[in-house]
Image (tube, rainbow, N blue to C red):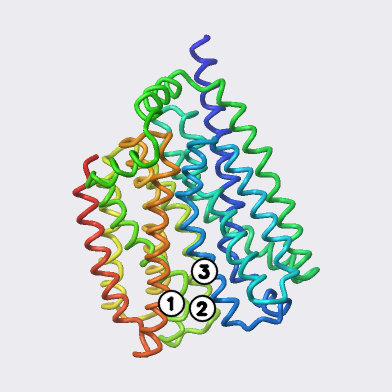
Amino acid sequence: MNNGKNKVSVALRIILITLAGSFICTMNSGIRNNYGIMLHSIVDNSGISFASVSFILAVGQLIFGLVQPAFGILAAKKGNISTLISGVILSVSGMLLTPFCKSIPSLMLCLGIILPAGTGAISYGIIMGTITPKLPPKAVSTVSGIVNASNGIGNTVMSPAINSLIKAGGLLYGMTALSVFTLLIIPVSLLIVRKEKTATPNAAAVSSQLFKAKEKTNTKELFKTAFKSRTYIFLIIGFFTCGFHMALITNHLPTQFQSYGFSSEAAAYAFSIYGITTIIGSVLSGSLCDRFKMKNVLGFLYGLRPVTILLFFLLPKSIVVISSFTVLLGFSGAATVPPVSGIINKTYGAANIATLFGFVFFVHQIGGFLGAWFGGICFNVTGSYNIIWVADIAFSAVAALVSLAVKD
């Protein structure tokens, strides 16, 4: 009887922790993935040119990646809860100050630095570093997939909500309302920490072993050890190509569909499928990581990308083809996060996920910056995206090969 009650208690605890982590991730992605919806309102409100605001948002993408390893180090030294609260304060400050910015320097400070720095402190690596020690080891990959999938929920649910808020009362009204909901991250984070004392025996045992092995490792030694390992180097190479690939999708895919003669409505419909399939793909990836070697799951996901792109170019372009193309891109998109974070967890310990995954994600953002930039240059010069997709095929193939060579 007691054994049955313990199993129910463990299951409820896992569900609660998963929901809490997913909520934080949803709110964070809802902010950072919806700048495009806010873009015209920011331009109109500030009086700054569209090109200048776009550049500020591009800088914000780099800041978002750059601060993650820094906040990972802070989390290791001061605790995850302090980092999450700092992220909330920065995010809310950036949102509330942005509507009052009327010059490029002030907007760069608030929208290009403070706000993305805040979202970087509430990023996936920090979230998983907080909840992983409270989970049974067999549940970590599945939970990481669900938490990562909540990025898609943030896009699907919050995009129309933010748009409606701004239309109803303007940029200040929308930012203020979004800030109120963002503040809810603080009590949710405290809830996770409160549950830490009642972690399951399996989770506690594993966490104890991990921390015992890692507690005396300072940041310099940690990175020195990581960069001596081909596993970490290969994960970095793979995630760089992942960022390059994802930037092509989020920044240029709708334009590419329209270049084939499809209407903007048809392109938007096809692209809307992407958000849904990223959720499914991420959850499925986390589940597969519990059943198969994570390096094989990662290699398969990277390998699916060049095959998908090649088939797309060979087939005649129709609404069915572009929709199917988007579905496959979605399945293999954010799904790479659970195996990458899982391999880092297994290799370096839960205490170091935030720091090491944060640096990997920073490299991901560099790839994303280059993908978005060169994609635009390619289209301007040649009138198509063919050359950049050929480069993406090559990069994805390399990512698949190095992932299969990871020591898991």
- What residue is drawn where x is 39% and y is 36%? 218
Give the camera-side residue of 199 and 43: 43
Mark 1 is on which residue type?
Answer: Ile
User: Which residue position is annotated with label 1?
Assistant: 319
Asked whether disc 1 touches disc 2, contact meaning CB atoms under 8 Å apart, the reply is yes
**Image position of 162 with respect to 283: above or below:** below
| Relative horizontal placement of residue 176, taking residue 400 as reference (left or right) | right
- Pinpoint residue 277: horizontal percent, then vertical percent: 45, 58
Q: Nearer the viewer, mark 3 or mark 2?
A: 3
Q: Quadrant of residue 38?
A: bottom right
For the residues labelled 3 and 2, the Cα–Cα distance comes to: 31 Å
Which three-letter amino acid code belongs to the residue tagged 2?
Ala
> Which of the image's four quarters has the C terminus?
top left
Write down the quadrant of residue 303 in the picture. Answer: bottom left
Q: Which mark is residue 59?
A: 3
Distance of mark 1 from mark 3, alpha carbons? Answer: 35 Å
The residue beneath circle 2 is 266
